[in-house]
Amino acid sequence: MTPPPQVWPTLRATDARALIRFLVDAFGFRETVVHGDGDRVDHAQLSWPLGGGIMLGSTRDEDGPGWPLRPGTFGAYVVTDDPDALYARAVAAGATVHMELTDTDYGSRDCAFRDPEGNLWSFGTYRGEPV
């Protein structure tokens, strides 16, 4: 049995609310919680239907060297059971295609996109090697 996810990739966004909407509409993430007032997002959790998810928030003046993630510097690989459907959904939602659907030599079917902030999202059927 696979344990619950304990690694949560995080990112910052110039327009976090717009990025949340995009990730939900284009890729199928689920909005679990969003904290913040007005345009500012202090903390958001988006869950992935197959498990795990990401956390994100708005850029902050006080981020400085302690949390140097800048918008557009994030990248992630996300497992999907149906990359063809995800590809079609993302293209219909206006996602920028970084890599067309591709069958890899290790048996995965992959594709990749850039979100409106410039982050790179790869999707594929490869689930990693057994531990």
Image (cartoon, helix red, strand yellow):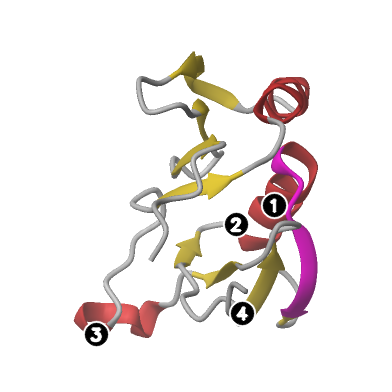
In the image, which disc is placed on residue 18?
1
User: Tag 2: Cα neighbours inside 10 Å, few (<14), some, or many (≥20)?
Assistant: some
Cα–Cα gap, marks 3 and 4: 28 Å
Q: Mark 2–mark 1 contact, CB under 8 Å?
A: yes
SS class, disc 2: loop
Q: Looking at the picture, does residue 29 appear above or below residue 92? A: below
Cα–Cα gap, marks 1 and 3: 25 Å
Residue at image x 49%, y 40%?
Answer: 126
Q: Looking at the picture, does residue 110 appear above or below residue 10? A: above
Choose top left, top right, bottom left or bottom right for residue 30: bottom right
Q: Which residue is mark 3?
A: 66
Q: Amino acid at mark 2?
A: Asp
Q: Is residue 28 magenta?
A: yes
User: Tag 4: Cα neighbours inside 10 Å, few (<14), some, or many (≥20)?
Assistant: few
Which tag, 4 or 1, sits closer to the chain's start? 4
Q: Which residue is mark 2?
A: 15
Q: Identify the image quadrant of the N terminus.
A: bottom right
In the image, which disc is placed on residue 4?
4
Q: Amino acid at mark 1?
A: Ala
Choose top left, top right, bottom left or bottom right for residue 115: top right
